[in-house]
Amino acid sequence: MTPDHPKVLIVDDDPSHLEIYGLLLQRAGYEALTTQVKFAGADLPQDAGVRLVLLDYKLQSLRTSAEFAREIRDLYPTAPIVVLSDLWSLPEDIAPFVTDFVRKGQPARLLQVVARLLPRAEEATAAEQDQR
């Protein structure tokens, strides 16, 4: 990974959303990783250098998005989690685990949020590495 192309993980149950948001991020200069949530769960990448996570809220899975958010927080403690959903506001059950909320269908706002959060994620990762 280079600083010019930070990795953004997209977690969604809809393959078309993974493709659309992956292309949007790639065109904006980010490296997009995707994980499709299935009914039984999802395999999140380990040690992938993820700097930010986009997480869908309405998942067709036995696990809730809040459960995924907890797992994501454990795997990538410095990575901001942004809920990407068609809901009008951030649900309370996931709020403690996430940094921001963006409604689907707002690509310009999504890119603004990603650009705003990634410098902070890079700083947190550098500070964590300094402590080692």
Image (cartoon, grey):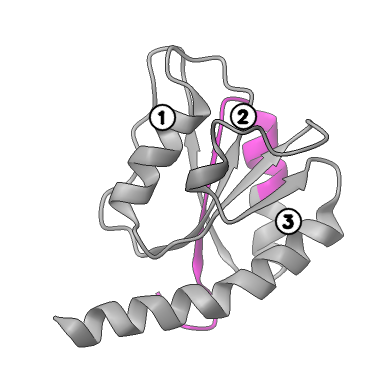
Of circles 2 and 1, the one toward us is: 1
Of circles 1 and 3, the one toward us is: 1
Q: Position of residue 26 (x, y in %)?
A: 65, 62
Q: Pick whichever, 101 or 53, lies toward us.
A: 101
Query: Does the CB distance between marks 2 and 1 fall below 8 Å?
Result: no
Which is more N-terminal, label 1 or label 2?
Answer: 2
- Examine the rendered structure and indicate whether residue 130 appears above or below residue 63: below
Q: Is residue 112 left or right of residue 40?
A: right
Q: Residue at x 39, y 21 (%)?
A: 41
According to the picture, the residue beneath numbered tag 2 turns out to be 15
- Examine the rendered structure and indicate whether residue 89 appears above or below residue 32: above
- Examine the rendered structure and indicate whether residue 13 appears above or below residue 104: above
Q: Is residue 89 left or right of residue 114?
A: right
Q: Is residue 10 left or right of residue 87?
A: left
Quick one: label 1, few (<14), some, or many (20+) residues within 10 Å? Answer: some
Q: Position of residue 100 (x, y in %)?
A: 65, 54
Check disc 1 and report its element: helix, strand or loop: helix
Q: Amino acid at mark 3?
A: Leu
Q: Residue at x 58, y 56 (%)?
A: 99
Q: Position of residue 4 (x, y in %)?
A: 54, 83
Q: Residue furthest bottom?
A: 130
Q: Amino acid at mark 1?
A: Glu
The dot on residue 24 is 3
- State the quadrant of the C terminus: bottom left
Q: Is residue 2 visible?
A: no
Which is more N-terminal, label 2 or label 3?
Answer: 2
Q: Amino acid at mark 2?
A: Pro
- State the quadrant of the N terminus: bottom left
Q: Which residues are magenta?
A: 1-21
According to the picture, the residue beneath numbered tag 1 turns out to be 67
